[in-house]
Amino acid sequence: MTVLRNDWTLAEVEALFALPFNDLLFQAHTIHRENFDPNQVQVSSLLNIKTGACPEDCSYCSQSSKYDTGLEREKLMEIDLVLEKAQSAKDKGATRFCMGAAWRNPTDKSLDKVIPMIQGVKAMGMETCVTLGMLTQEQAFTLKEAGLDYYNHNLDTSKENYANVITTRTFQDRLDTLESVQNADIHVCSGGILGLGEEQTDRASMLRSLSNLEQHPDSVPLNLLVPIPGTPFEKVAPPTESEFVRTIAVARIMMPKSVVRLSAGRTEMGEAMQAMCFFAGANSIFYGEQLLTTDNPDTNTDQELFTRLGINQSQASSH
């Protein structure tokens, strides 16, 4: 029986990262099989409903108003277009539809405009997810009443590395929003980005912060940084392929019942690397040609990959 732990020490997590690669993958895959069908991958789709002009200074992000990345600012998308995109995603096999807005934190007025979008997507029979920035406890309850299934709020990196990446908010601000979301009984979607100038100990620390939340996140998206020209991190060296796969494997071991999502950066990954990630415990992807403002493999490419690997899409997600 799988035991869920919320008391990992940094030394224990670093010891997992230090295992020989094959031993780590064997352990991760064994745990993966105990909790999931290893040939099922859940599919989500992500839509940017409000682009750019964000007051935060995240050093990797094209949507920050602090950097000139050539990104066109766009107002909040009209609900009819959002629902049209959601229907298209559903037709291509997505079971969850995520909507992202480039806000530091939504005003109550902004939230009132997003709620009908959530209700419209839910009426299509899809799971709903939004990422809108920091939330108050009251706003989290409002989203729960609207029928929201998931709230995405990534930790991004370790507590120790955080100030090197973002200065306009603190690591504790992220944890406070996650606590508000969990208090409202909304599923948490929270992970991080690899390639933010971090060391392996930072990856261990980030996964420890996620696994030591009161409840493990239901979804853990792990992103490979897509360097954006014009941002401070445009020339940061990416992690090696084995470092990325190791992080997937350690996440699977530490959070055995969470869905681990292979998120941004898949266009940079070859077939073998993605297959290795699925073996290590990744069992969700984002579908569609674009994730917020970065490229993603097109749907046909993913279908062909699934066919070659013998992976069947989950038609209904339990996480």
Image (cartoon, rainbow, N blue to C red):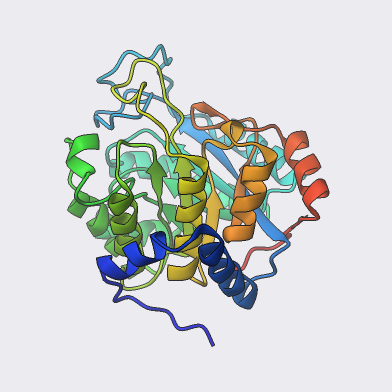
From this viewpoint, is residue 173 visible?
yes
| Residue ID at (23%, 58%) | 176
Residue 130 in the image: state x and y as whole percent: 46, 47
Image location (x, y in percent) of residue 112: 39, 44
Look at 43% across and 21% down and name the residue there. Answer: 74
Indicate the quadrant containing the C terminus: top left, top right, bottom left or bottom right. bottom right
Q: Nearer the viewer, residue 115 or 282?
A: 282
x%, y% of residue 302? 73, 40
Q: Specify whether 186 is left or right of 25.
A: left
Q: Percent x, y for residue 24?
A: 51, 64
In-front residue for pair 11/291: 11
Closer to us: 258 or 147: 258
What residue sits 60% from the left and 36% below the top? 269
216 left or right of 57 in image:
right
Q: Residue at x 38, y 29 (%)?
A: 237
Question: Is residue 255 among what the camera can see?
Answer: no
Judging depth in this view, the residue of 168 and 74 nearest the camera is 168
Which quadrant of the rendered structure holds the N terminus? bottom right
Tell me: residue 22, above or below residue 84. Answer: below
The count of marks equals: 0
Vertical side of 17 occupied by 240: above or below: above
Q: For residue 313, which quarter of the picture? A: bottom right
Q: Is residue 197 left or right of residue 300?
A: left
Query: Which residue in the rendered view is the most extreme toward the front?
Result: 20
Q: Is residue 194 placed above or below 139 in the rendered structure?
A: above
